[in-house]
């Protein structure tokens, strides 16, 4: 997706979430969701570096720690802890599906 320039009313659309943006037919990533280039994660330069990193992950030489949140817990007696886990996952790892 390409970057979109901000236009009047963008904030109203963005507050309703990604689904709302899709329903409106938005085809570009709003600037609000794009990190400045200096803050983006980098694997180094070149496709060979990326391929090497992916091979390391596949071989188990690199540990990836992603949060696991059981969303079913949101409807049970453990709701408070599930909300805390979800909030931590969002703040530490960002958007997820």
Image (tube, helix red, strand yellow):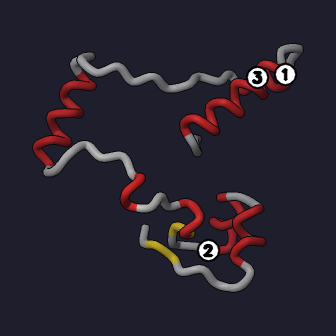
Mark earlier in primary sequence (2, 3)? 2
Q: Residue most toward the left?
A: 48
Q: Which quadrant of the rendered structure holds the N terminus?
A: bottom left
Question: Could you tell me how far apart the alpha carbons at marks 3 and 1 are, in whole angstroms?
Answer: 5 Å
Where disc 1 sits, the SS reads helix
The numbered dot on residue 82 is: 3
Instruction: Assess disc 1: are there few (<14), some (14-19) or many (≥20) residues with their C-alpha within 10 Å of its C-alpha.
Output: few
Q: Name the residue carrying label 1.
A: 80
Location of the C terminus by quadrant is top right
State the residue position of label 2.
Answer: 25
Quadrant of residue 79 within the rendered picture:
top right
Residue occupying the far bottom of the picture? 8
Is residue 63 placed above or below 33 in the rendered structure? above
Can you say whether 76 is above or below 24 in the image?
Answer: above
> Hey, which quadrant is residue 2 in on the image?
bottom left
Q: Secondary structure at mark 2?
A: loop
Q: Tell whether 25 sits left or right of 55.
A: right
Percent position of residue 6, x then y: 60, 80
Residue at the image point whose x is 77% and y is 61% from the top: 16
Q: Residue placed at 68% from the left, 73% from the top?
A: 24
Residue 56's disc number: none
């Amino acid at each position: 997706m390409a970057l979109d320039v901000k236009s009047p009313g963008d904030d109203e659309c963005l507050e309703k979430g990604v689904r709302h943006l899709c329903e409106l037919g938005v085809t570009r990533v709003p600037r609000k969701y794009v990190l400045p280039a200096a803050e983006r994660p980098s694997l180094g330069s070149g496709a060979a570096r990326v391929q090497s990193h992916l091979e390391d992950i596949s071989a188990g030489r690199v540990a990836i720690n992603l949060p696991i949140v059981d969303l079913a817990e949101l409807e049970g007696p453990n709701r408070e802890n599930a909300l805390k886990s979800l909030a931590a996952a969002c703040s530490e790892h960002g958007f997820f599906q």
